[in-house]
Image (cartoon, rainbow, N blue to C red):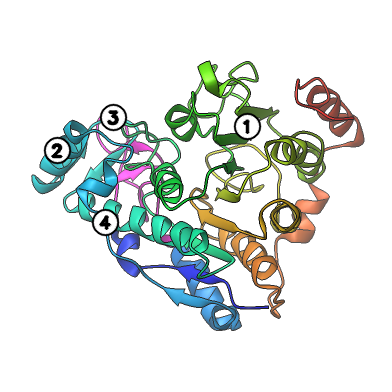
Amino acid sequence: MAKPAFYFDEKTLWFTAGLSALVQPVGGWVQPPASGGHADSPDPKRRLKSLMDVSGLTQAFDVKTAAPLTDAELQRIHPKSYLEAFKAMSDAGGGALHPTAPFSGGSYEIAALSAGLVSRAVLDVAEGAYQRAYAISRPSGHHCLPDTPMGFCMFANVAIAVRAAQEAGIGRIAVLDWDVHHGNGTEACFYDDPNVLTISMHQEACFPPGSSGAVEAAGEGAGIGANVNVPIWPGAGHAAYLYAFERIVAPSITEFAPEMIIVVNGLDANGVDPLARMLAHSETFRALTKSVMALSEVLCDGRLVIVQEGGYAESYVPFCALAVLEELSATRTQVEDPFLDLLIEQQPSTEAITAQIAALARHPRHVP
């Protein structure tokens, strides 16, 4: 099997949201942290790349970088007014255009590079240079609306790449988002588009808080039915995620019959993430990857791009990401997940799993 591509640039890890305690800016009653800072730290992704290098997994990929997107390319999704406001504040030293998306000086250029890595990965697969690709995206993109950043996301990276792939001749694209937070930005970008299937598996009412990501949000106009939200109860673990994929996600993608699948690989459903309350582990993400790869083989000649976005447990995200990358490259390293046994022991009870599956079975897209 030909090597998949891996898109990475150290410069994207230099993005910073400033000094915060988890997600709250320092000041008032919020004391400076003893170490680290904002929850969106570069460490989970930097430590993943280190683990790849030390384990030898990097050699299973063609490692590539990309150019930052131009303003014209960013305008596939974002209006000029938003680009100008973001650039001006970035040049002035940073700030926040939305309270959940602070940024420092120089962030505009880093965000354009992050979006460029994703678009290059998608276009290289769309144009046949690679069958599969993986991109590290920072800052992330799945919460970003066309005219408003949100949730640590400055540009709608995957949405921009989808539009680029459509321009390159890929007609129907499925975007599967298993980040623990609802992919509201991607949903908004394609809510009336019948040619882009958007699926979000997420912790119910986590972020954006409230009704975002409800089952009832199924698209509008020509896009009715092309948006699928799969809210999952807090505390769900391995069994619930695999059940949701098998009975809701896979049938929805199969029915849509895409020409390419893009996965928003948020890894924050892991059992120790500070910004969620789920109990997935590295083998959960390995199994999801194996399943989506099988779907891509049947439906779209294996065309698959996986984009790493969320995931904030610096000690554990690297092991979850490594499992995904091992599956994508058909390579097993000698790395063992040191947290796996503990997380398996912490999985929900049979009673809790039964209740969760009963809730998922009521989903309108559930297939018995």
What distance separates the C-alpha of mark 4 from that of mark 2? 15 Å
| Start-end of magenta stretch | 16-44
Indicate the amino acid at tag 2. Glu
| Residues under numbered marks 3 and 1 in contact, where contact means CB atoms less than 8 Å apart | no
Q: State the SS at label 2.
A: helix
Horizontal relation, residue 298 to residue 212: left or right: right
Instruction: Report which residue position mark 1 lands on.
Output: 203
Q: Position of residue 179 (x, y in %)?
A: 57, 42
What distance separates the C-alpha of mark 1 from that of mark 2? 34 Å
Q: Check disc 4: other Cα within 10 Å, few if <14, some if 14-19, many if 20+.
A: many
Q: Earlier in the sequence, mark 1 or mark 4?
A: 4
Mark 1 or mark 4: which is in front? 4
Q: Earlier in the sequence, mark 1 or mark 2?
A: 2
Q: Residue at x 55, y 57 (%)?
A: 305
Q: Residue furthest front?
A: 169
Mark 3 or mark 4: which is in front? 3
Indicate the amino acid at tag 1. Gln
Q: Does the magenta stretch include residue 29?
A: yes
Q: Position of residue 42 (x, y in %)?
A: 39, 59
What distance separates the C-alpha of mark 3 from that of mark 1? 25 Å
Q: Check disc 2: other Cα within 10 Å, few if <14, some if 14-19, many if 20+.
A: few
Instruction: Report which residue position mark 2 lands on.
Output: 84
